[in-house]
Image: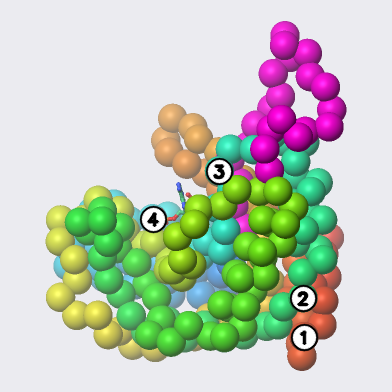
Amino acid sequence: MNEGSSAAPRSASMPAERMRVFFALWPDAATAAALHARGRTLRAECGGRLMRRETVHMTLAFLGDVPASWLAVLEEVAGALHAERFVLELDRVGGWHGHRVLWAGCETVPAALQALAAELGARLHAAGFELEARAFNPHVTLVRNALRSPRQAETPLLRWPVASFVLVASERSADGAHYRVLERWSLGEGGAAPVRSRGPN
Ligand code: 2AM
């Protein structure tokens, strides 16, 4: 979406509030704990900064800084989406960007996850949002700024049952980024439409 197309006129003396937002899969408590434990193992081997358990997630679509007034459009886009539940079988770890990011991922990306990310991307694009052109590369960042990448890519299987996706605000403070879940949508069984849940959790 391009700011020039924003309908509401704005006074120069009152800049619009902006928010840094992204769509993501947010793990249940047990999956978050298991992913965090995997991050601790990675950090023990490779060094670096461990992500906090409550921040662990998988990004579906990164929007970046948008005017807060656009959140309603994002919620409308997400609410219109048709996608199914799936189980994410996390069985790989690796490093990117000269091991600045160590991640957990899967050897085989579930078709339902690929479809969810593709439909979300297409609907956001149709609504006028500019997304990065790079291909969806599903991963969970567990450690940042490591000294090396893990020696072995294969890991014991961790099954993450995915039944919803969320819209998240990234808020910066003196002690780093904090993530706030703004809204959650349940995924359907057998292709049912997502249902917006009450509140973010
Ligand atoms: P990362 O974990 O690989 O850094 C919040 O920053 C989330 O959005 C992270 O999961 C991050 O992925 C992801 N993301 C995707 N594109 C991004 C970008 N251009 N800038 C910052 N974060 C991005």
Q: Which residue is mark 2?
A: 82
Cβ–Cβ under 8 Å for marks 2 and 3 = no
Badge 3 residue CB within 8 Å of ligand 1: yes
Residue located farthest toward the top when viewing the structure as drawn: 13
* Mark 3 burial class by Cα count in 10 Å: few <14, some 14-19, many 20+: some
Specify start and end residues of the magenta stretch as a single range: 1-23
Q: Main secondary structure of the magenta part?
A: loop
Say what amino acid the circle numbered 2 marks: His
Q: Earlier in the sequence, mark 4 or mark 3?
A: 4
Asked if residue 175 is positioned above or below residue 29 in the image, the reply reads above
Say what amino acid the circle numbered 3 marks: Gly
Q: Earlier in the sequence, mark 4 or mark 1?
A: 4
Q: CA distance from mark 2 to mark 4?
A: 31 Å
- Viewed as shown, does residue 178 lie left or right of 48? right
- Residue placed at 77% from the left, 85% from the top? 191
Is 99 colored magenta in this rendering?
no
Q: Which mark is residue 64?
A: 3
Location of residue 12 in the rendering, given as x and y in whole percent from the top left corner: 72, 11
Of residues 120 and 194, the one nearer the viewer is 120
Quarter of the image holding residue 27? bottom right
Asked if residue 33 is positioned above or below residue 200 in the image, the reply reads below
- Viewed as shown, does residue 27 lie left or right of 79? left
Q: Secondary structure at mark 2?
A: loop
Q: Which residue is mark 1?
A: 191
Q: Quadrant of the N terminus?
A: top right
Q: Secondary structure at mark 3?
A: strand
- Residue placed at 77% from the left, 33% from the top? 6
* Mark 1 burial class by Cα count in 10 Å: few <14, some 14-19, many 20+: few
Q: Secondary structure at mark 1?
A: loop
Q: CA distance from mark 4 to mark 1?
A: 33 Å
Say what amino acid the circle numbered 4 marks: Met
